[in-house]
Amino acid sequence: MTDITLLDGGMGQELVHRAGDRPTPLWSTQVMVDHPGLVAEIHRDFTAAGATIATTNTYAIHHDRLAGTEMEGQFEQLHGLAIAEVKRAGAARIGGSIGPLGASYRADVMPDHDASVALFSEVAKHIGPHVDLIQCETVVSVAHTHAIIEGAKVAGKPIWVAFSVDDTDGTKLRSGEPLADAVAAAHDAAVVMVNCSTPEVILAALDVLATSGKPYGAYANGFEKISDGFLGDKPTVDALTMRRDFTPEMYADYAMRWVDHGATIIGGCCEVSPAHISEIANRLRAAGHSIV
């Protein structure tokens, strides 16, 4: 049948659930200090579930996220902790995550192009030597696409870019711009994906990704919606609510539709647990696909 790359799931939410700590604007960053080894444990659980790529816990390690917190000035140390945790887990392949500047889902808070490229490059330089590919995650505008890919190039590794799309229209970025425009801007990416979006809009997004001629895929989230309370300054994840119907079986149903639609990279974002990934792995094998 088809060779499918199975990504892992949502590290940040899994950390919140397991640590039991009240969420802070630092998301999963503080947990590496307060609960050393927990990130590696989750990496191992996703790998045991069938994931073939472990995504570094570096999504939120940006200077602007750390500013004004007790973690300010620990940019390099935190990247070092995240790399150590993923290496401790022994994954076959490592994807180096670079998240958005300013805040997730908001195109309006990203710095200008040159400043953004410099900040993305700084992350890429730190994680590049330790990973097999760079995952540019939750890309929400055409300007974001240009800046993060340019910044990621300094790592000298394949670039996988994942766009986050509107919760009601998978053909539009969260900025309101056409997804097709961002896909066209991602000419230097090796892979194009859609991530951290509701499962219902993924098929429409895949139709757009397919026009790129590149391998494409998806990893959705399990939130009811991206609430207004999450779009302010330094939001916390308790402003978001997990869907009541978000079972491993339900998510695997969606994932298999994406595979039938030509996606060859599948995984999960926020609220996707090792149980969800395990169910997808079982379904893929039962359908005759190879997980690579």
Image: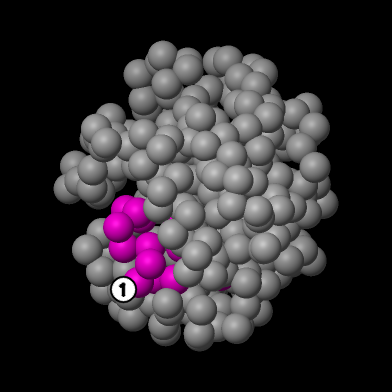
Outermost residue toward the left in this view: 228
Q: Which residues are magenta?
A: 192-206
User: Residue 213, image x and y in percent?
Assistant: 60, 83
Which residue is at a point 60% across and 46% down the rendered structure image? 286
What amino acid type is highlighted by mark number 1? Lys
Which residue is at a point 62% across and 72% down the rendered structure image? 215
* Rendered-image quadrant of the N terminus: bottom right
Which residue is at a point 48% across and 17% down the rendered structure image? 18
Reading the image, the residue beneath label 1 is 172
Whether residue 23 sits left or right of residue 290 in the image: it is left
User: Residue 184, image x and y in percent?
Assistant: 50, 85
Which residue is at a point 27% across and 36% down the rendered structure image? 245
> Within the magenta stretch, is there residue 196?
yes
Q: Is residue 58 above or below residue 263?
A: above
User: Residue 21, image x and y in percent?
Assistant: 40, 16
Q: Where, by quadrant of the figure, is residue 22 drawn?
A: top left
Report the front residue among 266 and 136: 266
Looking at the rendered structure, the secondary structure element under dot 1 is loop
Report the front residue among 122 and 141: 141
User: Residue 246, image x and y in percent?
Assistant: 33, 37
> Within the magenta stretch, is there residue 104?
no
Total numbered circles? 1
Report the front residue among 273 and 116: 273
Whether residue 271 sits left or right of residue 209 in the image: it is left
Whether residue 31 sits left or right of residue 200 in the image: it is right
Can residue 35 be seen by looking at this rendering? yes
| Pointer 1 local density, CA inside 10 Å: few below 14, some 14–19, many at least 20 | many
Can residue 5 be seen by looking at this rendering? no
